[in-house]
Amino acid sequence: TKEYGMWEKKKRLDDTKAFLGKGAEFIGKLIFTGHVRIDGDFQGEIFGQGAVDIGEGALVKANMEVGSVFIGGEVKGNIDVKEKINIHSTGKLAGDVKAPVFIMEEGAVFDGQSRMSEVKEQKRIALAGK
């Protein structure tokens, strides 16, 4: 439902560990847990256990290994996610994706290759081992 989506977004905002605002630039390596929001320009590498939210107008040139990623801006780089990737209607991704769940809204741009089967298989093996 719509209410759940709003609650989920509010929860993510409350859990935000780092924020790079519009007009800000960062070059380097970002390692985090929780939620990170990027509205500016980021170049480098991103590693984390939580979610990365890339806002409309943001430019990210980075390879990522994260839990989830939500793309509203422009991303150039390869992405390896444990949970899901969501490219919003304003989002652009140029790079390869490994993800068990891949969501693309109408209007989104994706230029690359995606792999789901090997990620789902790894998840199945991990769950069977518990």
Image (cartoon, grey):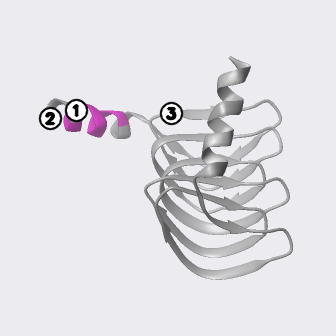
Rendered residue at 48%/55% (across/down): 66
- Left or right of residue 59, residue 63 in this image: left
Q: CA distance from mark 1 to mark 3?
A: 17 Å
User: Which of 122/47 is in front?
Assistant: 47
Badge 3 or badge 2: first in the primary sequence = 3
Residue 3 rendering spot, x and y as whole percentages = 71, 22
Residue 26, above or below 20: below
Residue 73 rendering spot, x and y as whole percentages = 78, 54
Question: In the image, what residue type sits under mark 1?
Answer: Leu
Magenta stretch contains residue 125: yes
The residue beneath circle 2 is 130
Question: In the image, what residue type sits under mark 2?
Answer: Lys
Rendered residue at 26%/31% (across/down): 124
- Left or right of residue 42, residue 22 in this image: right
> Which label was assigned to residue 101?
3
To which quarter of the image does residue 39 belong? bottom right
* Residue range of the region highlighted in magenta in the rendering: 120-126
